[in-house]
Image (tube, rainbow, N blue to C red):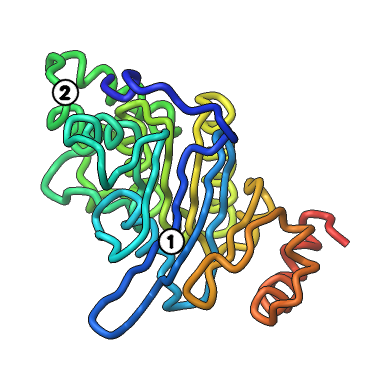
């Protein structure tokens, strides 16, 4: 794949580096002078209150939203100053799972998964199908799901198909936007474990926007808190529990936070 033509950086173990990011929409400033590092090999949870711009930040990282100020480096490449050819190689090195999968309703499961291969590679149709079927198996779906359409699938299955499509180019970086939203607790826990297994087996770096406290406790190595238009704190959950910022205290030590912590055996 094209992604393999770029080596992952080892300096400081940082795969994604955001510095001074400012996002404005009209007079509304969503992010101002925001800094964030995503370390190679980690699962980073991104949390924040409604309207803090979590999804906007993911879209900024992948270039769907252009920041007003600041710089974005991915795999050591400055995405604002690099050549188009270099940026294209980097883009082929990430996979994105949008909310609810964002599948093409008119395409079958198999065609949805192999869509990036058809758009960004020159491999044969037979090899595209073989890779897509392998990714379908990788996310825990049966092969008889391949000819179905998104409207025939449950919400959990659509998310898994979206995840298979995000993995089809063998990315180094996986970006997930509310991956367990709308799933029942059993389905959400299974999806969390799938993400953890894929990270461990494929050596992925994962950044995950989520409201799910169970997910944070189950699989995240660190958690970044988006508040006051910037990354207010980024650390392990035990260290965040000592952070005096009111929203962090309410989030982790409120009734839902205490229940999630109790479920994981955290005092």
Q: Is residue 157 above or below residue 22?
A: above
Q: Nearer the viewer, residue 149 or 171?
A: 171
Quarter placement of the N terminus: top left
Name the residue at 39% across, 61% down.
57
Residue 197 in the image: state x and y as whole percent: 57, 32
Nearer-the-camera pick, 70 or 89 = 70
Element carrying mark 2: loop
Residue at image location 26% in from the left, 22% down from the top: 2
Query: Residue at position x 39%, y 39% from top?
Result: 74
User: Hey, which quadrant is residue 92 in on the image?
Assistant: top left
Task: Pinpoint residue 69: horizontal percent, then vertical percent.
Answer: 33, 63
Look at mark 2 in the image and give the residue it sits on: 121
In the rendered image, which quarter is residue 13 located in? top right
Q: Is residue 231 above or below residue 149?
A: below
Q: Is residue 111 visible?
A: no
Q: Is residue 254 left or right of residue 38?
A: right
Q: Quadrant of residue 212?
A: bottom right
- Answer left or right for 7 relative to 210: left
Q: Are marks 1 and 2 in contact (CB under 8 Å)?
A: no
Q: Residue furthest bottom?
A: 27
Q: Which residue is mark 1?
A: 20
Upstream in the sequence, badge 1 or badge 2?
A: 1
Q: Work out how far the residue at label 1 is from the one at label 2, CA to CA, in angstroms.
A: 34 Å
Q: State which quarter of the image contains the C terminus.
A: bottom right
266, 159: nearer the viewer: 266
Badge 2: residue crowd in 10 Å (few <14, some 14–19, many ≥20): few
* Residue 187 x %, y %: 53, 51
How many residues crowd around disc 1 within 10 Å: few (fewer than 14), some, or many (20 or more)?
Answer: some
Residue drawn at the location 42% of the way across and 71% of the way down: 32
**Would you say 237 lies left or right of 73 here?**
right
């Amino acid at each position: 794949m094209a992604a393999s033509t770029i080596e992952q950086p080892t300096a400081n173990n940082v795969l994604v580096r955001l510095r001074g990011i400012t996002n404005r929409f009209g007079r509304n400033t969503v992010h101002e002078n925001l800094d964030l590092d995503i370390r190679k090999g980690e699962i980073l949870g991104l949390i924040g209150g409604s309207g803090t711009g979590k999804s906007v930040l993911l879209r900024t990282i992948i270039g769907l939203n252009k920041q007003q100020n600041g710089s974005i480096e991915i795999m050591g490449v400055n995405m604002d100053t690099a050549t188009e050819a270099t940026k294209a190689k980097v883009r082929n090195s990430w996979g994105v799972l949008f909310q609810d999968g964002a599948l093409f309703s008119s395409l079958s499961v198999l065609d949805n998964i192999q869509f990036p291969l058809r758009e960004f590679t020159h491999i044969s149709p037979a090899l595209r199908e073989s890779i897509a079927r392998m990714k379908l198996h990788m996310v825990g779906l049966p092969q008889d799901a391949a000819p179905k359409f998104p409207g025939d699938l449950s919400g959990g299955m659509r998310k898994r198909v979206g995840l298979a499509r995000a993995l089809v180019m063998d990315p180094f970086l996986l970006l997930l936007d509310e991956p367990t939203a709308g799933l029942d607790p059993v389905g959400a826990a299974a999806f969390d474990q799938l993400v953890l297994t894929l990270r461990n087996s494929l050596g992925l770096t994962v950044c995950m926007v989520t409201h799910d406290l169970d997910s944070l406790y189950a699989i995240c190595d660190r958690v970044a808190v988006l508040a006051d238009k910037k990354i207010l704190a980024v650390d392990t959950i035990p260290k965040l529990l000592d952070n005096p910022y009111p929203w962090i205290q309410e989030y982790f030590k409120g009734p839902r936070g205490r229940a999630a912590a109790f479920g994981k055996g955290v005092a």
